[in-house]
Image (tube, helix red, strand yellow):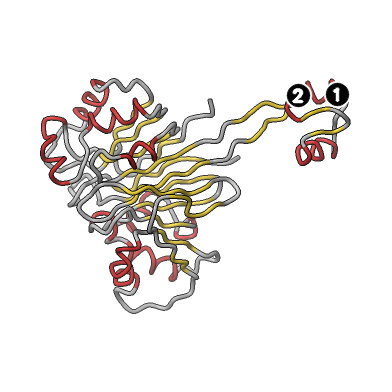
Amino acid sequence: MSVRELVVLGTASQVPTRHRNHNGYLLRWDGQGLLFDPGEGTQRQMLRAGVAAHDLNRICVTHFHGDHSLGLAGVIQRINLDRVPHPVTAHYPASGQRFFDRLRYATAYRETVRLKQRPVAEDGELDRSKSYALQAHKLSHPVESYGYRLVEPDARRMLPDRLAEHGIAGPDIGRLQRTGELNGVRLEEVSELRRGQKFAFVMDTRLCEGVYALAADADMLVIESTFLDEDLQLAVEHGHLTAGQAAGVAVEANVRHLVLTHFSQRYADPEEFERQARAAGFTGELTIAQDLMRVPLPKRR
């Protein structure tokens, strides 16, 4: 059975606290593992969360501030130490190539794994696998930053009772799926549309067009909410969002499950982020992220 879940490795902004590690998020998606924004300490958080280096297929970095990238050195070296048997692809802003190189080769180690570098220089599709397309959109932050979006293609679910009515069974089902028609029976007559799921990851940014493009119709949106609404001016000045702004995006973008994270250390009560998100009108599933929690993607509509 395929697993689609978010494993939260860290939820702090700028600096870790006693209860929150630097950023780090692993998305499990049908046997693939996508690691987003590995901040300092991510390798240890992976151990605590039961995430192995072998679980990683992609590393996606939104931007090169330390809380989103300082863990790259340790994670990359662990991938090589454990001799991960498959290639690992790294995505990051092309403008930060020098930072990626420095982190990749921060110390001496033996390279045993093929690490494919696929930097991001513009909006659009980055790569495609059997079960998703990976897209990027530029955000608004003091340094160049990109958010990421996974889009599963739509498919069709075969309906056994309708197949039986038309006498279609065995290998003929596969032929019908491939050709779209068999003996005068169209695929649409014996199946129903299964909408693909969407996942969006939005870190440090002000409100901008890219935020809404990433969040559109997402089944799960993981988004920063560094500040509470009373500190809106600080959020704008430093290139961040408030809880109310993040929730407002989710409302407008028709998001099903909203995950708020990247909290400033200035706030002691995480429940206030939930209260402000609800006050902004978001009525769907809402998670205030905590380190080491696992959040399953919503079931299909």
| Residue 1: percent from left, percent from top | 60, 40
Compared to 58, does 183 lie above or below?
above
SS assignment at label 1: loop
Nearer to us of marks 2 and 1 is 2
Residue 46, position as x, y percentages in the image? 37, 54
Quarter of the image holding residue 67?
bottom left
Q: State which quadrant residue 182 falls in.
A: top right
Q: Quadrant of residue 120?
A: bottom left
Residue for point 88% across, 26% down: 167
Residue ID for mark 1: 166
Q: Is residue 41 left or right of residue 56?
A: left
Which residue corresponds to mark 2? 189
Q: Residue at x 47, y 66 (%)?
A: 116
- Number of other residues with Cα within 10 Å of mark 1, as a class: few under 14, some 14 to 19, many 20 or more: few
**Foreground of the two, 10 or 201:** 201
Task: Give the residue type at disc 1.
Answer: His
Mark 2 Cα shell of 10 Å, populated few (<14), some (14-19), many (≥20): few
Provide the secondary structure element on which disc 2 rests: helix
Mark 2 or mark 1: whose residue is earlier in sequence: 1
Residue at x 20% of width, y 32% of height: 270
The spot of residue 244 in percent (x, y) is 23, 29
Q: Are marks 2 and 1 in contact (CB under 8 Å)?
A: yes
Depth check, front residue: 202 or 53: 202
Residue shown at 46%/57% (left/top)? 58
Query: Between marks 2 and 1, how big is the CA–CA gap?
Result: 10 Å
Identified by mark 2, the residue type is: Glu
**Is 165 located above or below residue 218 in the figure?**
above
